[in-house]
Image: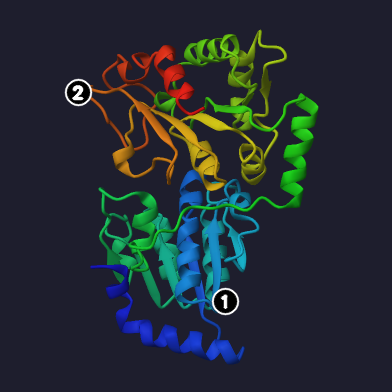
Amino acid sequence: MTGREAIFENRYVLNLCSAINRITSFIVLKILILQTAFIGDVVLASPLIDAVKKEYPYAEVSLLTIPYSAPALKNHPGLKEIIVFDKRGKGGFCNTLKMVKRLKNDNFNLALVPHRSFRSAAIVWAAGIPQRIGFDRSAGRLLFTDVIEYRKDWHEVKRNLSLLGMEKENIAPKIYPGEAEEAKASQLLERFGVKNGFIAIAPGSVWDTKRWPEVYFQELCGSMRKRGFPQVILVGAANERELCERIAAGMEGYGFIAAGELNPLESGALLERAAVLVTNDSAAGHIAAAVGTNVMSIFGPTAPDFGFAPYGEGHIIVEHPDLYCRPCRIHGSRRCPEQHFRCMKELRPETVIKVLESMF
């Protein structure tokens, strides 16, 4: 079943609300998008916002997401508001009940739920949102009014658009750094003494096995410096700063560290000025792609076929050409299940530098 088929029965109501809303404020079509996964997943949900506004231009669209991811879609022109839900913060179940009450009072007409957890489905069900659309692979699929097939062979962007029956639309992820974010990026570059056109490197990941070896990043940076590549700025979260410091050790005047200094949207403003981003399979690749910067993404235990490669043209994937055990998991893991980590160890720096040269 497609998303368009799923909402067919209620489409006349939604269209009527949308039509009336064009000439009066008495009836407002209110649509909620719920995505509380990792920040990359939130960026990949941005085309769904654009699709909703294309289908229902007068609807009010809200995004429910977690605190760390919320800044990524700040300034998005299609959003009325971003609702922040600290699902792992203090309060636990009480926080969930408060959110349910909040959503119930907001009187949403439709909920689109890309996130596949039971809690996400339970929240929109308990809030009494009359139409709730999610994937058949959701742990809470029985709580949806309409269930859409989760296509493993599609990119996540296309899967998300299928919730609204608009998977044929070519809508790319996009984020919108504003004046404050652009100023922060400019100040950082001025402090480093680095011009636009630098090479950004994101060596971290939530999952240990998705990280290309630290020593390889060191060798890559050293090789880039010898070959006259532009200066390097290492980006990432605050807990990745020490990793970046170790990689940049001994590269005074060439390698600079921005890890921990920027929120996701500020990172977008910085990456927008880079010539290319070299990254693991992580959120940084999606942020860079969403501001139009070419990405070279290193895949180890995961694979682009899962649908989470940087979206769009101009991006390059570097991966092991032939290994019996990969891909092993959709998100990676803390340790290599086979105990050899060949998917990353056999991707040598000389291979990566050759690919990087082809992007200039």
Q: Classify 137 as above or below 215.
A: below
Q: Residue at x 64, y 46 (%)?
A: 265
290 or 100: nearer the eye?
290
Q: Farthest residue toward the left?
A: 324
Q: Classify 289 as above or below 143.
A: above
Type of amino acid under label 1: Asn
Query: In which image quadrant can residue 102 be found?
Result: bottom right
Residue that label 2 marks:
324
User: x, y percentage for residue 254?
Assistant: 67, 16
How is the structure coloured here? rainbow
137 or 57: nearer the eye?
57
Q: Is residue 189 left or right of residue 87?
A: right
Residue that label 1 marks:
105
Q: Secondary structure at mark 1?
A: helix
State the count of labels. Answer: 2
Q: Judge whether residue 210 can be spotted in this image.
A: yes
User: Local crowd at mark 1 within 10 Å, few (<14), some, or many (≥20)?
Assistant: few
- Image quadrant in which the N terminus is located: bottom left
User: x, y percentage for residue 161?
Assistant: 38, 61
Q: Residue at x 76, y 25 (%)?
A: 192
| Number of the front mark, 2 or 1 | 2
Q: Residue at x 73, y 26 (%)?
A: 194
Type of amino acid under label 2: Tyr
Badge 2 or badge 1: first in the primary sequence? 1
